[in-house]
Image (spheres, rainbow, N blue to C red):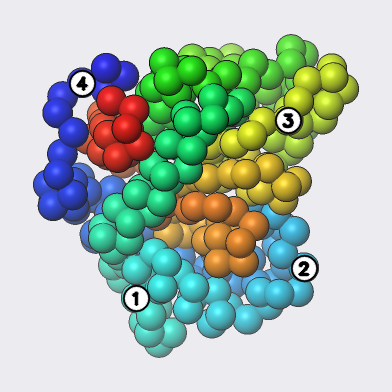
Amino acid sequence: MPIPGTPPSRADLVTHLVRTRIAGDVATPRENNLSHYRKLANGDRSFWLGLELGDRWTDEQDVLAVMAERVGVNDDPEYRYGQDTIDPELTVDALDRMAARLRKAADGRQRVLFATGHPGGLLDVHRATAAALRAAGCDIVVIPEGLQTDEGYVWQLADVAVLEHGASLWHTHSGDPMRAILQGLERDGDPAPDLVVADHGWAGRAAQDGVDAVGYADCNDPALFLAESEGTLQVAVPLDDHVTSPRHYDPMTAYLLDQAGLL
């Protein structure tokens, strides 16, 4: 099994998400959330996560409304400081939608690319999912060698594309690493992935380029949820993407793979 232990029930997973603060009362404060929504609405492209949002989301209240609906943050625009939330039921609903797309990939033995801009939290979630899809007969995309962006080198570790900078795995919101991969595959005459499973700009850029993409996103990273609402991104799973231990994500990953029929 890619993940140890018995997959939890939905109810048990909800309890676990709240207990570990993957969802529920999360560590990201309200003021940080609103600041990011405002910057996205004001056209700060570093918050667009590889997407091209144009002038469709220039009102931060529209952004807040989507985040309240799809993530479960407080929907009151006058609530500006203090604790904010992710609804664990919405997290599990999104995991179920992602599981359906993973099942489709497994049934079709599709080419799947994994990537993360949050290796400290989500690397093993992606690694375990890649291992399960490989066992089901999928072709896990091997990225071209020698790719780099202004931030660093694009590497692949345990079947997951990451950004390396100064001999360390790098946290990045940029879509440039994904763009480098897709351009590199095209240059080498390799087909594009049928599916990208990622987060941050890796997921956003793939979706923007017309590749089926699903991903994880925190409540202060609204772009992927806006893309899902528009139909550009297939699934955005709301969660705190860097909790105190990466092992806290194991039950979530086991649930996802079990729902996809991959355990």
Residue at left offset 68%, top offset 42%: 211
Res 171 visible = no
Q: Earlier in the sequence, mark 1 or mark 4?
A: 4
Q: Amino acid at mark 2?
A: Gly
From the image, state whether disc 2 or disc 1 is nearer to you: 2
Contact (CB < 8 A) between labels 2 and 4? no
Q: Tell me which corner region of the image, top left, top right, bottom left or bottom right, holds residue 247.
A: top left
Of 199 and 221, the residue lying toward us: 199
Q: Amino acid at mark 3?
A: Ala
**Mark 2 falls on what kind of element?**
loop
Residue at left offset 59%, top offset 72%: 38
Residue at numbered disc 4: 4
Residue at numbered disc 3: 192
Residue 206 drawn above or below residue 111: below
Q: Amino acid at mark 1?
A: Asn
Query: How many labels, in total?
Result: 4
